[in-house]
Amino acid sequence: MKRISIGTWAYTIGPYADKPVPFGEVLERLAGYGFDGLELGGFKPHPNPDDVATKDARAAVRQQVADAGLAFSALAADLWAQKLINTTDTKPYLDCFRKNLDFCVDLGIPGIRVDSVQPPTIFNEVDPATARKRVVQTWQRCAAEAADKGVYVTWEFEPGFAFNKPSDVLRIVDEVGHDNFGVLFDACHAHMIAAVGARQPGERETLPGGAIELARRLSGKINHIHLIDSDGTLHGDETSTHAPFGDGQLDFDTLLPILNAAGVPHDWWTIDLCFWPDAWTVTEQCKRFADELNEKYGG
């Protein structure tokens, strides 16, 4: 069976930015719902590298999570203040990544999420070949340094960030070419990229079969999974709407066996309710839906 976690950013950003759910309360409720773990959004007000800066403080957070009967599935690192594509100096990005990597090591978090940071409109400033070279070379460094510390790197592609076409995803993961680097397959992002072609610059590129076909093509390259539904729309014309299970268009009965065969090197499924307006109130029903999927496809 799979272990089920959920991203804590759902309770701190977007609709919850002015009323974030305290970390201790998140742990208590997730444990009560029977979650196996949490995926930490490493930014205020939840534990993050700047506010939890000492070894002792980090050990205390690690123990707090363990005492709740939970584990970390991965870290969503706060890299969004950095530049990656429209700069010749990626040292600030790498330094921020390293800070978050050390945070992972101290908390016992096995994986760290990255993205291309900047929107697809960045190609109005930088040509795609130059942009891709910067991204690939930077992530090669990240993957190698993280490998030395026993943490894997996973890239979450999505409509809101550069390189949001299926061919981009396949090409970049191949060009990074490191065993410690892979793709984070978020079901709703995959649908919006491969079936809808949302926010793609230039000619729209989709795949017959949408997310299902993209999952097939990415077999052997996926090292992390986010599960949530998609209604085919964007949130704020920016990123994919993370619709609760059953409120969207995804065929999980077809998708999950393909993801099971994709060679993901761990047993976590992470629910992602990013930007959902009442994420706190629908968490339990999403957990029940994930449990039903787990009964059918988690073995």
Image: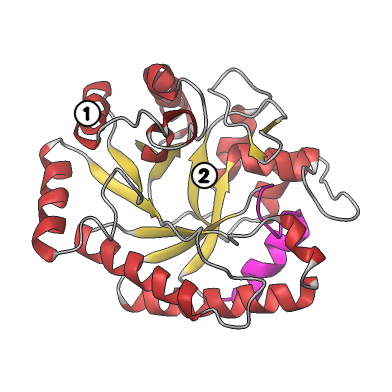
Q: Position of residue 118 (x, y in %)?
A: 63, 59
| Residue behind mark 1 | 25
Query: In the figure, is residue 26 to the left or right of 168?
Result: left
- Left or right? Give the position of 298 relative to 119: left
Q: Residues within 10 Å of mark 1 (few under 14, many from 20)?
A: few
- According to the picture, the residue beneath numbered tag 2 turns out to be 260
200 relative position to 2: left or right: right
For label 1, the SS is helix
Q: Quadrant of the N terminus?
A: top left
Q: Quick one: which residue is furthest to the right in this view? A: 203
Along the line of sight, the residue nearer the viewer: 114 or 119: 119
The label number, if any, that marks residue 269 in the structure image: none
User: What is the span of residues highlighted in magenta in the rendered image?
Assistant: 159-177
Number of numbered callouts drawn: 2
Q: Is residue 2 visible?
A: no
Specify few, some or many for label 2: CA neighbours under 10 Å numbering under 14, 14-19, or 20 or more.
some
Q: Is residue 135 magenta?
A: no
Could you give the CA–CA distance between mark 1 and mark 2, rounded to whole angstroms?
Answer: 32 Å
Local SS, label 2:
helix
Q: Amino acid at mark 1?
A: Glu
Residue, x 34% and y 48% (percent of image)?
Answer: 73
Magenta span contains residue 169: yes
Residue 189's place in the image compared with 110, above or below, is above
Residue at 13% in and 65% down: 55
